[in-house]
Amino acid sequence: MKPITLILILLSITSVLGVITIVTDSWIKIILSGVPPTSIAYHSSVLNPINNTLVIFGGKNKDTTYNTLTLYDIINDAWLNMSLSNSTNNSPAGSIPSARYGHVALTTPFNTMYVFGGRDNTSVFNDIYKYNMELDQWVLIKPTGTPPQGRWGHSGVMYAIKNQFLFFGGKTLDNLLLNDIIRYDFELDAWIQPIEYGSSTVDPFAPSKRYLHSAILTLTNEMVIFGGMEQQGVSNAIYLFSAETNVWLNSTLNTTSDLPSPVSSHGTILTPLGQMLVFGGQLKDQTSTDAVWKFDFKYMTWTSILPSGLGPDARFGHTATATNLNTMMVFGGQSSSSSYLNDIAKYNVVNSVLRSSSDGVVLVVLLSIVGSMIVGLCFALDLMAERNERAKLERELKVTGSELKLKKKSKKPEEVRQPLFEKF
Ligand SMILES: *[C@@H]1O[C@H](CO)[C@@H](O)[C@H](O)[C@H]1NC(C)=O
Ligand SMILES: *[C@@H]1O[C@H](CO)[C@@H](O)[C@H](O)[C@H]1NC(C)=O
Ligand SMILES: *[C@@H]1O[C@H](CO)[C@@H](O)[C@H](O)[C@H]1NC(C)=O
Ligand SMILES: *[C@@H]1O[C@H](CO)[C@@H](O)[C@H](O)[C@H]1NC(C)=O
Ligand SMILES: *[C@@H]1O[C@H](CO)[C@@H](O)[C@H](O)[C@H]1NC(C)=O
Ligand SMILES: *[C@@H]1O[C@H](CO)[C@@H](O)[C@H](O)[C@H]1NC(C)=O
């Protein structure tokens, strides 16, 4: 038997034993530690990939609007103590953003989080702030270019190839809805002009003005706008904008596709397989949903997902954040207009061979040990086989040429032992 065959057999055995677990679309039970933050909605949540923490900022509840940063350790499922950064020692005062909700937070490949726009009780913002996730510092920035109109309930994606953020839509202080696309260069800290206004009358594929929709960037750099509140009400339409070619694309659904209910204030992530996953949101009748939907860009098809496991309550105004462990974290939001939430939920997104990286390490080590054992065993078996072969040959020789052998043997001189202490 070849070593590879043995390894394959062993792999099948271990997978049967559950070392390799195939889990997909399921809510995972969390054993939580630490003190959860206040119940909030319309906050932001991004992943700090360096140490696998969720960085949650801002939000509001019935009485208060926040500018608090809260950290959640997704490896150990632990709330870390709230740390309101005070960067006055390192940069001019006032660099901590004012309390806000309905803002957009995005991260760069340089481990920085930017916060753009949002609102509080009285104002709608057009400012942009930078938070260094490694140093835990807010940094005041003065971007070049003309700042866009203040907005909240907008959306944004990072377009890494060009070091840009693309923001879309939102609502102004005057309650006007928007459908413009704004670009921000996070390497130069500059607003890129001119602002591109999508006009549904000119461009048949551009979305109508909206807010409280979602945006993700696909693996092929299309910004996907889904749902939200239009002038006419809640939407369930999908729109694709090519970040590369700067045009709205034909996003006609597959005729065989299912269709989710119109929804706003939902949570959306891009899965590692390039699909869009949507959880929750607010429906037409103001109620909240706990529905999970998946969109496949290859076939332009929606699929309703019925995840296994006990999921979180229906909600809207929550955040859904993709981790790099094939999971989606859902935090906060509202279950009704008066009820705010502070629970956190974990969703397993992809068919995963290994449930976590630590499992992966264990398995690789295990396989290496087993692999070397098998190689060693094969080597030993080979040696034994060789020895048997030689013995067999020798026996045959003995039979055919026994006389010669015996003669040879008798002629062989006796071994003489060297005295050990010859020199003494
Ligand atoms: C809005 O302002 C009112 C009056 O100042 C205050 O009572 C309320 O708590 C504020 N709400 C939020 C969400 O900040
Ligand atoms: C969090 O803060 C509380 C109160 O300041 C403190 O007692 C506790 O030890 C802290 N926990 C951690 C993990 O730092
Ligand atoms: C930040 O630092 C300044 C100056 O040291 C101080 O006045 C202010 O209270 C601090 N704010 C927080 C939230 O710690
Ligand atoms: C991750 O990094 C941030 C910023 O340095 C720090 O505040 C936080 O405690 C770290 N989290 C963990 C789990 O180490
Ligand atoms: C958009 O795509 C659909 C299906 O792929 C096609 O039927 C339709 O004609 C296209 N629309 C335009 C304006 O090209
Ligand atoms: C529509 O979906 C079906 C399967 O669901 C697929 O076979 C077909 O290719 C899709 N059509 C388009 C135009 O993507």
Image (cartoon, helix red, strand yellow):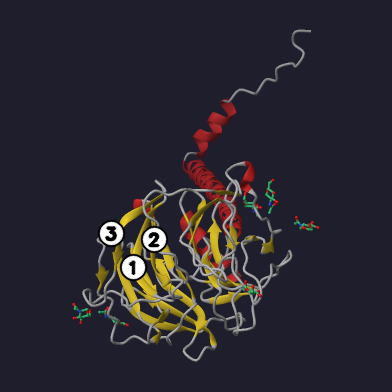
Mark toward the start of the polypeptide (1 vs 3): 1
Which of 158 and 275 lies nearest the eye of the viewer? 158
Q: Quadrant of the C terminus?
A: top right
Query: Can you say whether 2 is above or below 118 in the image?
Result: above
Mark 2 residue element: loop
Q: Is residue 2 visible?
A: no
User: Which labelled disc corresponds to residue 244?
Assistant: 3
Mark toward the start of the polypeptide (2 vs 1): 2
Q: Where residue 365 appears, x then y in whole percent? A: 59, 52
Mark 3 residue element: loop
User: Which labelled disc corresponds to residue 343?
Assistant: none
User: Which labelled disc corresponds to residue 148?
Assistant: 2
Q: Is residue 366 visible?
A: yes
Residue type at tag 2: Pro
Q: Seen in the image, is 30 located left or right of residue 264? A: right
Q: Are marks 3 and 2 in contact (CB under 8 Å)?
A: no
